[in-house]
Amino acid sequence: MAQPDFEDIVDTFEFLDDWEERYRHVIELGKAMAPLDEALKMPATKVDGCVSQVWLVPEIEGEGAGARFTFKGDSDAMIVRGLVAVLKALYSGLSVAEVLKVDALAELARLGLDDHLSAQRSNGLRAMVQRIRVLSEKAAA
């Protein structure tokens, strides 16, 4: 179910030798994202449950379960910004119905992130996944 961009990240992680290189790659993914307009960094787009500040702004094209899901995001922490980029690769372009079928924790486990993120970062990542699911549920209704 994973998108080609996410599969590219999985392939790159398999190629990289150690976690320091993998963290650098995640940070580079975050740096490559366009910055989020400051006007969009507001309480309504902020993800609760993250130690770092994280904003996710949905961009849904169409209506109902077949609507296509993409989002913009940002964070004040470089590694978290990279995690936003990883989630963009996982979800962007799926229909909102498909987003709800993605087992994000299983997909992210393919990267080994669950074993290498701090408890706080893991909780924040789960909060971002939950926010994406909620946005998709609202769009599908």
Image (cartoon, helix red, strand yellow):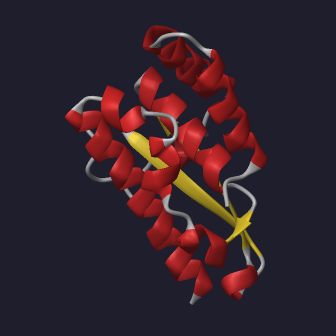
Residue that appears at 50% across and 31% down: 81
Q: Is residue 76 above or below residue 73?
A: above
Residue that appears at 75% across and 59% down: 93
| Percent x, y of residue 65 | 67, 84
Dividing the picture into quarters, in which one does residue 136 lie?
bottom right
Q: Nearer the viewer, residue 105 or 91?
A: 105
Q: Is residue 70 left or right of residue 79?
A: right
| Percent x, y of residue 89 | 66, 44
Residue 46 showing in the rendered view? no
| Percent x, y of residue 24 | 53, 13
Residue that appears at 48% across and 17% down: 23
Quadrant containing the C terminus in the rendered view: bottom right
Q: How many marks?
A: 0
Q: Is residue 116 above or below residue 129?
A: above
Furthest-left residue in this view? 119
Quadrant containing the N terminus in the rendered view: bottom right
Q: Nearer the viewer, residue 123 or 101?
A: 101
Residue 141 showing in the rendered view? yes
Q: Is residue 71 left or right of residue 104?
A: right
Q: Is residue 139 above or below residue 11?
A: below
Q: Is residue 50 left or right of residue 1?
A: left
Dividing the picture into quarters, in which one does residue 30 lie?
top right
Residue that appears at 63% across and 34% down: 10
Q: Is residue 44 above or below residue 120?
A: below
